Amino acid sequence: MSVDDESGAAALGSSRPAARIRGLRKVYGGVVALHGLDLDVVPGSVVGLIGPNGAGKTTAVRCIAGLLKPDSGEVSIAPSSTPGKSPVAIAAQEIELYPGLPVEMNLTFFSELSGVADAERVLAELTEELELGPLLGKLPKDLSIGQQRLVHVAAALVATPELLLLDEPTAALDVGARETLLAAVARRRAAGVAVLLSSHQLQEVETTCDSIVMINHGEVIAAGNVDDLIGEHGGGRIELTVDGKVEVVDGDDVAAAIDQVMATGGRLEAVNVIKPSLETVFMSLTGMRSTDVEAS
Ligand SMILES: Nc1ncnc2c1ncn2[C@@H]1O[C@H](COP(=O)(O)OP(=O)(O)OP(=O)(O)O)[C@@H](O)[C@H]1O
């Protein structure tokens, strides 16, 4: 990773990417995890990084954060435009908290590590924003997995980064905590932070992200504005279960789909109508079914 040495003063409010990724390639032994990823994340936007299990999302996020060395390619991170803020912070997929420190000390430690200005105020605001108050005195082992995840993401937010990398930040969060966290992400976007959000939760990606990069087997299979992609690839589909087998019919005409599938006989057990959405884009481009997507 390189942090550009030009002044970052123009980064906020400009279209200059906070992260500029070109030709990112990573091979593990014989497995090519990334074939040459191109990606920009501009200030004040949230880019969703989506793809099936093993697509290469975590590899990409870790390479961008500088935690993993790519085999080739360029990762440029814009320097911080504001003294006391970090250029980049990551909430990695694996929860990383110091087991011997209560939550408050963990967060204080991470804010000191990043050299954030006015750490006490930042921590107090974050505690209120993410409703962390009841957790502050507890050790990580005494938290639920969802609570640990929230504190783990908070440890990235205390760095007040200008580029925020989030790898499955809402995994294991309940509905309330998920909404609280996504609202915090939206506030940072509004404040000019560039966010890269990797997630399997396509509904939250659809509502939270301005654009997406969809990868499969380490290659980009779609990229762009969420609404444009839904318009282009997200036609509705109908899944009909006949004698335990799922048949997929494209379109939104349920009666015609039933007629088509029942023409060959069999017992109709279930009909699942899927409206155009990021999920239908995902299914159309990866060949997955809705049940696969729910399980992923
Ligand atoms: N340390 C490793 N050693 C060998 N292969 C690895 C390693 N880490 C990842 N891989 C492989 O690289 C590919 C991409 O993995 P990666 O974890 O980046 O995918 P992902 O999209 O984040 O998956 P998931 O959605 O399941 O978290 C997979 O084929 C995976 O098996």
Image (cartoon, rainbow, N blue to C red):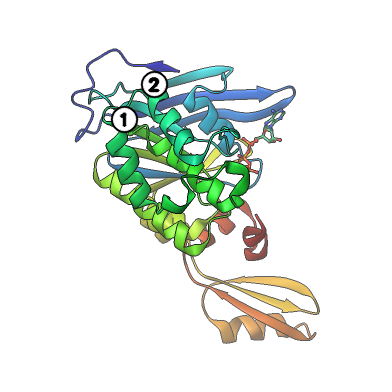
User: To which quarter of the image does residue 271 belong?
Assistant: bottom right
Residue type, label 2: Ser
**296, above or below 290, in the image:** above
Where in the figure is residue 262, as x and y percent of width and height? 72, 85
For the N terminus, give its image quadrant: top left
Question: Is disc 2's CB within 8 Å of ligand 1?
Answer: no
In-image side of 168 versus 45 (left or right): right
Where in the figure is residue 167, as x and y percent of width and height? 52, 41
Looking at the picture, tell me which residue is in the foreground, 51 or 242: 51
Q: Are marks 2 and 1 in contact (CB under 8 Å)?
A: yes
Residue shown at 27%/41% (left/top)? 44
The answer for how far apart the CA atoms under marks 2 and 1 are is 9 Å
Question: Is disc 1's CB within 8 Å of ligand 1?
Answer: no
Which mark identifies residue 17? Answer: 1
For the C terminus, give its image quadrant: bottom right
Residue type, label 1: Pro
Secondary structure under tag 2 reads: strand
Ligand 1: image quarter: top right
Residue shown at 56%/38% (left/top)? 57
Looking at this view, name the residue that lies furthest to the front: 137
Which mark identifies residue 76? Answer: 2
